[in-house]
Every structure is written in structure tokens, then in C-alpha cells.
Image (spheres, rainbow, N blue to C red):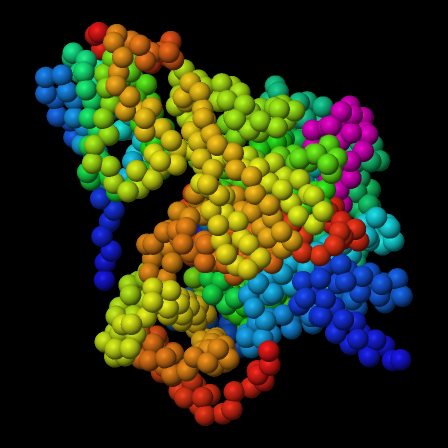
């Protein structure tokens, strides 16, 4: 507390004020004792230009932050109460910083977790690091062989990603950080020690401070993050270093999740490729088209399958297979793979469907399961403009034939399912497709599609037949698309089983060569 | 011969070929034009696209059969595929030199042709295009985005009834940080539904889409925690949900009401009854879509289109009005729905007094 | 405006001397088959093996291929036990499936004496009831 008279002379200085203003004594002049902000405030109160009720002022005295409250006394003196605000301000600043950091971390987490793509995740991590902590950030990912994916980001600039050969050992601490084990703390390194490749294009000025921090992954090293500031900027504070470590933990977790996802997706993709239904084309003057929809829309494979094995030349029969394994999902899909491979191996015997089916049956019988398959075999050969077909059903829905006049016939073939009984018996039916006629093989997922305008009806064979009657003369592809579209509409958003169908058509017009098979659609998915 | 008439001639010849189911001639027309120096984009957008458009128009007017429609579409698709094949074989356009984009149809959407054209045009412009085709389940689309990290997704929809699904797809793509460019009839003639559903951009056609990509699309802020419902605050009234959940019951009850009102309907065959039920289900689906995006025009446009389709097939359109009336009776507790039906009925009344456009009778 | 939920899937067992009757109710399909098989196998291995096992399908509402696979597995076990399987009160959906896959004769063939139907019986699910 100070009491000051109207002329700016100190009337009283208490003990606390003496600690704050060493050497201040009553009788001294205020202007010689305190900083300008305070004595000017006193002067404006004395000359009446400032009211004492205008609220406190604040300013620094030496290294303390003070709030000064003036109170007038009756004799014209002013009592100045000086409150030390230093610690409160420090606490407030720390709180705001913490709040900002929490916000930043939350933003960082959302951004990092939004993607499971590794390059994108590295891009996000590097650019956020450059935005929040440093002028530049370089994310060094674990190498593929000797080549390291590097992601460079400068504050406010674009992100650049390259993969190049580097000597990680040139950067002190980088090798350890990349190895991920033993755990190493973030580490300051001498700016003079860093190689040129670590400095991003567009980084201005000499490097002032550098931190290398590991990105801790989930048991797998996720890489290392290098933060750079130029010499004109403030070096990293201890608080910032802690914050950078928190950031690195988030980035590392996100990156290793993305990496694990990518690895899993790659493995699944590789395994699944073998099980996906093939693309069907025109073969030896006969049109083939196939359609597939898995029971679970997020999976792409299931228990239905089909194949077309082209004859070695146009005089030889091609073998069409379509079938259904009991069950759904991956379990069923694995068995379809076995069946397809077995049938492929049995192609030389395709002359005799029953024999092929019996050999397949023997290969599938298992002591611990009664999972079975039903299938149709069709041997197809073009003779002149007509197509000869031999059809055998092993416990499967009989094929339907769409004649040129719109009549729909059921092929009277039948037999046992395969994979459970000691032997199977079947009968084979021969028929001929005239130009424009189609033979449709399909699984029960089509006819058992549940839905329709009234909600809970089966699509049923009669609707399939009615739809096919309208398909007379259509190319195989259009027949498949028509049936798939009708069943999809029928289902709406309803649950369904695996659905597969193959159409075999005798082309309506002469042989085509211009539009060849290579160009036809591949299950609706293709890179261009 | 001017360029314009040359194109018109081509389109006319291609139309004849596809409607005859003559793939050979269709391919010859298009590849011949390419040999004569017509550029591929022009062929795709000014010859093939109008022919495909005409397929739909002619079907609506009952001048071609369903079989012809499907066959024509299949041929057009194969012609487009053969152009792409030829382009890749020739290597004329070189390696893609722009970014990578994904073209996909909305889950449940079967009309893949417009998406296919966009994919081809973008490939011609030098984009690396992943074309996912018709009926792409949203989980596949999202997995694909994680896998490829494209610069943008082009989401195509033809039927407005897929708008709710499109909304889910748009939100999902943006949540993984990929911007969405919506296109196709479903999003409205001016793209209003694309905006309502929060798509980053909209384009009217393939060239428009190419222009938007050329400008560059900004990635959505993945840290913004936007919920789909934020886009459509009117959904809190639950009317959309109610209509969707009771769809089958609404159709059943409406069918029963109509049979009471029109005793002649009781003599309908099963197939006729089913057609009627399907028509009613369509009305409910479009009603639901209109409720979802809160747009009357969506509903009325569907009704007038259906009226034209029915009239072209000599079915009096007043059956539509009767269906609407019966529906309104069941939904009277839902003000937004009732208002939509009222407007629909009014528009139909006005529509039926004017002469039916289009279909001149010919064999 | 409510729809009835699909009937719950249940199995009821009735044991009489020499005969086990299983009343199958609801959908025997991908979702219910595993539990159904476990329950029937448990009954078969409990106590003295029956001579006849009657599956009563009077209230079966649906069966899919996984359901049929379950019937084939039950049959495999009843054959091992020397019991004859009977498929009673078959609704159209089951009849149709049996006809198409051509396994009715196989499933309902009278069990030959002592383990004759056991051509496939060296399996992992051994330890079935006393014979």
C-alpha cells in the first residue's frame, strides 16, 4: 500500500510495498519510485481527468504483475492498493494453454482417426504437427527395404510425400526412434548435425532447434516425427515438448491402426480374389453373363459360385458350373473354392457329368460335417447358329430356358446333392438354344428373395418366370441385369441370402468381332 | 456437311442399331466415327448419351418394350466399354496425369450408365478413375476410399428414392476425409438435394463434373463432428421414419380401401393386383423421399411422370388420385405428409386437363 | 400398425420307450441350426439310444440349406446309433427341398442292424449314447 499526496509525494509506504519497491521511503517522489504507468495514473487522478471509481489499473513492477486500486482519502491524498496478480495470471495462462492443447489434441485425434489410409494418415499427422508445434515437420515411416516413406510439411504450406533411400543413422536418435524398441524419449539434437534431406523445401532460414520423437505404435513401430524450428524462432519449451509427446502418441496409434487395417485388407483381398466370381465373356460364339450378390452386403463372397471353363477350341464343349454351398459367409465361401478347384481338375472328364459329380462328391465327404452343395453343370457348344446344351442338376433348382417366343421352360434334370451321401445319381438333359434363346442357371437366393410391395412375400419361381418371359431375345448380359434389378427392387432394404445367376445365350445375330469380350464389364469394378 | 448434322446422323444410326438389338452395327457406327476423326468425348456425350436418354423416353412412352430397353442399354454399355478398351490398347491418351477419383453409384442404384459416362470422360481428361459401378454397398465404397485415398468421390444417383441412402454415403465419405461430388437426376435438376444432403459439390453433367474437379475440391474437415441429422432438421418430426417403417401396411391397407371404393378391382388377377400394389409402393417410396429432403417438387414430379406413363399405356391416371386419397386417409396424423399428398393431388388434377405430351401412336 | 414377429424357434422333446420325438417349431435355418443340432445330439446321447427318432415338422415355418445340413447330421448320428429317422408332418417348404435335393430316401431309410449305417462314423463327435 502506498499513500500519495496530490503533488506526487509519497506519504506512506507499508512493509509489503517496501519489499516490492526496495528503498522507497515516505517523502520520496512517486515518479522516481514507480514505473510510468502508475505515476501517470496518479497524476490523472490528481488533476481530476480520471475518476477513482474507473476501476483498477494493471502493470508490471519489476517482474511482478500488479493490479493497482486507487482510493481517495478526505485530505486529497490517494491510497494505492497494489495487489500482486502474477501467480493468478500465470495460472490463467497455463489453464488457457491447457485448454487450447486439449482442443488441439481432440482435433488431431478426430482428424487422424478419420482415415485408415496410411499415406493420408501420415499427411494429416505431418501437417498438423507443422501447424501446431513447429515451422516444419518431417514424418519418417518405417522403411520398405532401404527406402523410407518421407512426409514433409511446412507451416501453412503443402504436404509433400516421397519415398527415398536415406541413411537414418545420419540423424542422431532416428534409428532408435524408428525401431520403436527400447522406448526412447523425444530427443533434442544439434541443428548442425542434421542432413540436408531432413529439411523440407520451403523451410526458410537456418534450423534453430530440432526434436526427434518416436511415434509409438501398437507393438509395431509407426515411424518417427522430426520437428524443426528456425533459429529466429523461440526454441521448444518443456511444456511444448510434453505436448509434442502426447501428439506423437496419438499419431502413432492412428498410424499403426491404419497400417494394421491395410495389412488385413491386403490379406483379405488376396484370399478373396480367388473366391470372387469370375468375369464372364463371350466364348466360342456363345454369350455368357453372370451376376452375384453376397448375403452380407459388406462381404463380397458367400456360398454361391459359378464358373465358365472354355472348351479348348470351338468344337469342344465349354463347361458352365453354378452352385450353392449350405451356409453363408466366409465358411461357405472357402468350400466354394474347394469345389471350384476340384471341378477344374475334373474338366477332362466333363463328357460324363454324373462321373464328375461322383468324384466331386467323394472329394467333399467329410466325417465331421454334413455341409453339402447343390449345383448344375452345363456343357455348351455352338453348332452353326444354334447352341447345344447338356444340363445336369445335382440337387439344385432346375435351369430355365427362355425360348424366342417368350415361352419359359423348366429343364427336367435332377439328382442328389453332393458332399454327404456315399454316391450320387443324376440325370442329364440335352437341349438346343436357337438364336436369341437363353438358358438361365440360378440359386435359390433369387426365388427366395423376401419383400415386394406387401413386404413379406417370396419373389418365387412364378415371378422369375414372368420376368424371363419378357426377356425373350435379350442378350445374356441384359437378362442377368434384368433379373438382378427386379430382385433388388423386390428386396428393398430387406435381408437376403447369397444370390447368383448365369445366363447362357445363343447370339441373335452373326458373329461379332469388333466388340470383343475383353471390353465387357468386370463385375462392375474396374480401374481405368 | 456441318458438324452438328454429322452428329445427329450418327445418333440416329446408333439409335436404330441399339433398338434393333444389333450390337455389331452399333459398334461399327461408333468406331467408324472415331476413325473419321470424331473425338471420343463428343461421341460419348453427344451421340451415345442422347441415344441412351432416348431409350428411357421411348420406354416411358410405351414405344419400346422392356426387353428392347434392356437390350439397348446393354449394347450401349458394351459400346462404351469397347471405346475404353480401344483407348487403352492404343495408349493414345497416355498415363493418367491428374489425381485419382472414385466413381460410384448410390447403394441400390441400378442405373449405372450416367456414372459410366462420367468415369470415361474423366479418364479421357487424364484422371485415374476407379469405377465401382451400380449398386455399390456403402461399406464397400468406404473400404475402397481407405484403400485408395482418392481426391474425390463422384456419387451418382438417378432415382430420388435413393436419396436417404445417398445421404448416408455422403456423410460416410466425408467422415473419412474425402470430398463428395454428387450428380445425376436424383439430386434434382438444380442439384438442390445434393446441397441439402451436404455434398461438397454438385455437377449437372459429365463436363460439369470435370470442371469441378479441375478447380479442385477441398477435403472436408474430418474433425468437424457433423451428424447426418444436422443437415435435415425437419426429420425430427419422425414422419419419414413412420412412413418408411409402415410401408407394407400402408400399401396393404390402401389396396383394401381401393377395392372397397372400386368393386371392379376385386376382379383383378393376381398379376394386376401386384402391379397396383407396386404402383402404390412406388408412391409411398417417393413420398418418403420427399419427406426426407422436405421437397414437394420431388413428389409432384414423380406423380406427373407416372401419370404420363400410365396414360401412355391407356391406364386412366385417376387411379393415382384415388390411391393418394386412400393414403391420405391413413396418414392424417402427419401434417407434412398430408400437405405433400394434398399438393400432389392438386398437381395431378391440373396435369390431367392438359393434353398428354409425347406418345403419338405408332406400331 | 404392427407386424407379428416371426414365431420363436423351439424344440420339444418327448421320450417314450424306444422312441424319441422332436417337435420342431419355427424356422430351422442358418440362425437356429447350430443350437438345434446341439440340442438333438444331447438328447440322443442321453440315456438309452432310441430305436426310432421322429422329427415332427408340423409347426416348421421355414427351412434353408443349413437346416437341411442339420437334418443330414442328425441322420448320420441316428444311423450310428442304429436308430431309424422319421420326418413326420412335412410342410411344403420341406417337401420341396427334399424332393429337389433327393435325400428323403437317404434320411428315412430304415436303420440296418447294429451300426450298419455307420460308413462315415470315425468322426470327431464320438462318444454317443450306449449301444
Q: Is residue A457 left or right of residue A267?
A: left
- Residue A142 colored in magenta in the image: yes
Please determine whether, in this image, residue A227 is positioned above or below residue A182.
Answer: below
Of the 4 image quadrants, the one containing the N terminus of chain A is bottom left
Choose top left, top right, bottom left or bottom right for residue B70: bottom right
Would you say residue C68 is visible in this rendering?
yes
Please determine whether, in this image, residue A91 is positioned above or below residue A58.
Answer: above
Q: Which residue is rendered at x = 62% and y = 51% of the image?
A: A434
Q: Nearer the viewer, residue B171 or B63?
A: B63
Q: Is residue A282 left or right of residue A238?
A: right
- Residue C82 colored in magenta in the image: no
Residue farthest to the left, as pictured: C17
Magenta-drawn segment: A141-170
Q: Which residue is rendered at x = 87% and y = 53% of the image?
A: B92
Q: Nearer the viewer, residue B34 or A441?
A: A441
Q: Which residue is rendered at x = 23% and y = 16% of the image?
A: C83
> What number of labels is visible?
0
Q: Is residue A228 left or right of residue C72?
A: right
Q: Which residue is rendered at x = 71% and y = 57% of the image?
A: A509
Q: Nearer the viewer, residue A303 or A224?
A: A303
Would you say residue A89 is visible in this rendering?
no
Residue C65 x, y percent position in the rendering: 38, 34
Residue B173 x, y percent position in the rendering: 56, 53
Residue A278 x, y percent position in the rendering: 63, 39
Please determine whether, in this image, residue A396 is positioned above or below residue C21.
Answer: below
Residue A410 x, y percent position in the rendering: 47, 47
Please determine whether, in this image, residue B84 is positioned above or below residue A172.
Answer: below
Choose top left, top right, bottom left or bottom right for residue A229: top right
Q: Nearer the viewer, residue B148 or A105?
A: B148
Amino acid at each position: 500500500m502506498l499513500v500519495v499526496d496530490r503533488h506526487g509525494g509519497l506519504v506512506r509506504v507499508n512493509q509489503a510495498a517496501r519489499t516490492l519497491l526496495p528503498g522507497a521511503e515516505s517523502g520520496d517522489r512517486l515518479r522516481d519510485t514507480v514505473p510510468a504507468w502508475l505515476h501517470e495514473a496518479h497524476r490523472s487522478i490528481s488533476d481530476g481527468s480520471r475518476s477513482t471509481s474507473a476501476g483498477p489499473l494493471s502493470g508490471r513492477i519489476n517482474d511482478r504483475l500488479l493490479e493497482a486500486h486507487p482510493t481517495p482519502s478526505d485530505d486529497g491524498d490517494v491510497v494505492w492498493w497494489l495487489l500482486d496478480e502474477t501467480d493468478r495470471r500465470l495460472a490463467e495462462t497455463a489453464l488457457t494453454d491447457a485448454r487450447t492443447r486439449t482442443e488441439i489434441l481432440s482435433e488431431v485425434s478426430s482428424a487422424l482417426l478419420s482415415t485408415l489410409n496410411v499415406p493420408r494418415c501420415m499427411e494429416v499427422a505431418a501437417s498438423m504437427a507443422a501447424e501446431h508445434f513447429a515451422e516444419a515437420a518431417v514424418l519418417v515411416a518405417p522403411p520398405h527395404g532401404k527406402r523410407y516413406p518421407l512426409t514433409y510439411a511446412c507451416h501453412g504450406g503443402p504436404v509433400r510425400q516421397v519415398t527415398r533411400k536415406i541413411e537414418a543413422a545420419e540423424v542422431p536418435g532416428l534409428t532408435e526412434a524408428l525401431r520403436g524398441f527400447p522406448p526412447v524419449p523425444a530427443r533434442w539434437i544439434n541443428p548442425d548435425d542434421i542432413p540436408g534431406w531432413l529439411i523440407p523445401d520451403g523451410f526458410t532460414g537456418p534450423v534453430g532447434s530440432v526434436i526427434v520423437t518416436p511415434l509409438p505404435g501398437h507393438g509395431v513401430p509407426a515411424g518417427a516425427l522430426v520437428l524443426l524450428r528456425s533459429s529466429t524462432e523461440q526454441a521448444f519449451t518443456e511444456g511444448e515438448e510434453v505436448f509434442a509427446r502426447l501428439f506423437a502418441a496419438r499419431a502413432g496409434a492412428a498410424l499403426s491402426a491404419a497400417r494394421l487395417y491395410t495389412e488385413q485388407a491386403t490379406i483379405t483381398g488376396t484370399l478373396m480374389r480367388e473366391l470372387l466370381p469370375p468375369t464372364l465373356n463371350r466364348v466360342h460364339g456363345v454369350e455368357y453373363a453372370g451376376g452375384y450378390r453376397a448375403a452380407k452386403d459388406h462381404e463380397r463372397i458367400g456360398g454361391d459360385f459359378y464358373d465358365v471353363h472354355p472348351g479348348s477350341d470351338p468344337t469342344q464343349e465349354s463347361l458352365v458350373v453354378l452352385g450353392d454351398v449350405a451356409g453363408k459367409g466366409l465358411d461357405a465361401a472357402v468350400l466354394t473354392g474347394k469345389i471350384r478347384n476340384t471341378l477344374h481338375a475334373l474338366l477332362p472328364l466333363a463328357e460324363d457329368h454324373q462321373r464328375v459329380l461322383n468324384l466331386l462328391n467323394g472329394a467333399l465327404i467329410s466325417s465331421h460335417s454334413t455341409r453339402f452343395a447343390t449345383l448344375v453343370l452345363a456343357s455348351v457348344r455352338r453348332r452353326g447358329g444354334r447352341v447345344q446344351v447338356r444340363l445336369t442338376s445335382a440337387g439344385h433348382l432346375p435351369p430355365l430356358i427362355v425360348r424366342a417366343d417368350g415361352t419359359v421352360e423348366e429343364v427336367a434334370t435332377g439328382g442328389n446333392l453332393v458332399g454327404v451321401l456315399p454316391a450320387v445319381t443324376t440325370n442329364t438333359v440335352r437341349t438346343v438354344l436357337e438364336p436369341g434363346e437363353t438358358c438361365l442357371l440360378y440359386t435359390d437366393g433369387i426365388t427366395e428373395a423376401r419383400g415386394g410391395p406387401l413386404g413379406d412375400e417370396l419373389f418365387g419361381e412364378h415371378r422369375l418366370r414372368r420376368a424371363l418371359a419378357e426377356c425373350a431375345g435379350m442378350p445374356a448380359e441384359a437378362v442377368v441385369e434384368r433379373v438382378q434389378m427386379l430382385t433388388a427392387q423386390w428386396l428393398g432394404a430387406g435381408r437376403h441370402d447369397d444370390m447368383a445367376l448365369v445366363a447362357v445365350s445363343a447370339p441373335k445375330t452373326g458373329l461379332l468381332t469388333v466388340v470383343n469380350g475383353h471390353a465387357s464389364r468386370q463385375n462392375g469394378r474396374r480401374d481405368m | 456437311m456441318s458438324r452438328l448434322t454429322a452428329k445427329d446422323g450418327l445418333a440416329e444410326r446408333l439409335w436404330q442399331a441399339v433398338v434393333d438389338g444389333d450390337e455389331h452395327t452399333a459398334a461399327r457406327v461408333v468406331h467408324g466415327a472415331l476413325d473419321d476423326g470424331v473425338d471420343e468425348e463428343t461421341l460419348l456425350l453427344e451421340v451415345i448419351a442422347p441415344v441412351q436418354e432416348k431409350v428411357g423416353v421411348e420406354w416411358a412412352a410405351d414405344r419400346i418394350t422392356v426387353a428392347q430397353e434392356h437390350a439397348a442399354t446393354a449394347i450401349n454399355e458394351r459400346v462404351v466399354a469397347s471405346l475404353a478398351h480401344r483407348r487403352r490398347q492404343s495408349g493414345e491418351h497416355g498415363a493418367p496425369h491428374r489425381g485419382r477419383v472414385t466413381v460410384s453409384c448410390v447403394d441400390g442404384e441400378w442405373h449405372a450408365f450416367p456414372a459410366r459416362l462420367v468415369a470415361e470422360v474423366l479418364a479421357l481428361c487424364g484422371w485415374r478413375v476407379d469405377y465401382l459401378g451400380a449398386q455399390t454397398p456403402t461399406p464397400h465404397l468406404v473400404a475402397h476410399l481407405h484403400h485408395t485415398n482418392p481426391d474425390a468421390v463422384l456419387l451418382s444417383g438417378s432415382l430420388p428414392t435413393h436419396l436417404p441412402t445417398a445421404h448416408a454415403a455422403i456423410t460416410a465419405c466425408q467422415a473419412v476425409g474425402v470430398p463428395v461430388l454428387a450428380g445425376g437426376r436424383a439430386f434434382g435438376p438444380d442439384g438442390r438435394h445434393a446441397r441439402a444432403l451436404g455434398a461438397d459439390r454438385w455437377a449437372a453433367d459429365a463436363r460439369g463434373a470435370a470442371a469441378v474437379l479441375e478447380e479442385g475440391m477441398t477435403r472436408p474437415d474430418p474433425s468437424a463432428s457433423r451428424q447426418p441429422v444436422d443437415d435435415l432438421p425437419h426429420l425430427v418430426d419422425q414422419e419419414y421414419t413412420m412412413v418408411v417403417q409402415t410401408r407394407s401396411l400402408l400399401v396393404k391397407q390402401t389396396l383394401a380401401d381401393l377395392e372397397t371404393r372400386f368393386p371392379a378391382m376385386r376382379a383383378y388377377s393376381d398379376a394386376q393386383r401386384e402391379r397396383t400394389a407396386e404402383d402404390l409402393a412406388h408412391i409411398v417410396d417417393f413420398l418418403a423421399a420427399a419427406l426426407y429432403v422436405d421437397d414437394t417438387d420431388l413428389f409432384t414430379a414423380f406423380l406427373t411422370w407416372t401419370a404420363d406413363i400410365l396414360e401412355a399405356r391407356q391406364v386412366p391416371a385417376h387411379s393415382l388420385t384415388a390411391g393418394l386419397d386412400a393414403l391420405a386417409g391413413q396418414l392424417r396424423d402427419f401434417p407434412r405428409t398430408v400437405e405433400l399428398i394434398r399438393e400432389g393431388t392438386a398437381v395431378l388434377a391440373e396435369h390431367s386437363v392438359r393434353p398428354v405430351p409425347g406418345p403419338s401412336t405408332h406400331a | 400398425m404392427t407386424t407379428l414377429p416371426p414365431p420363436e424357434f423351439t424344440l420339444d422333446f418327448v421320450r417314450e420307450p424306444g422312441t424319441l420325438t422332436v417337435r420342431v417349431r419355427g424356422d430351422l435355418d442358418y440362425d437356429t441350426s447350430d443350437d438345434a443340432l446341439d440340442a438333438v445330439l444331447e438328447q440322443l446321447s442321453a440315456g438309452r439310444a432310441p430305436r426310432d427318432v421322429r422329427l415332427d415338422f408340423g409347426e416348421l415355418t421355414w427351412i434353408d440349406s443349413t437346416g437341411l445340413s442339420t437334418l443330414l447330421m442328425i441322420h448320420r448320428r441316428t444311423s450310428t446309433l442304429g436308430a431309424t429317422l422319421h420326418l413326420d408332418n412335412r410342410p411344403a417348404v420341406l417337401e420341396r427341398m427334399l424332393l429337389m435335393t433327393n435325400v428323403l430316401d437317404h434320411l428315412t431309410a430304415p436303420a440296418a442292424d447294429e451300426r450298419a449305417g455307420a460308413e462315415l462314423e470315425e468322426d470327431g463327435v464320438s462318444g454317443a449314447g450306449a449301444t
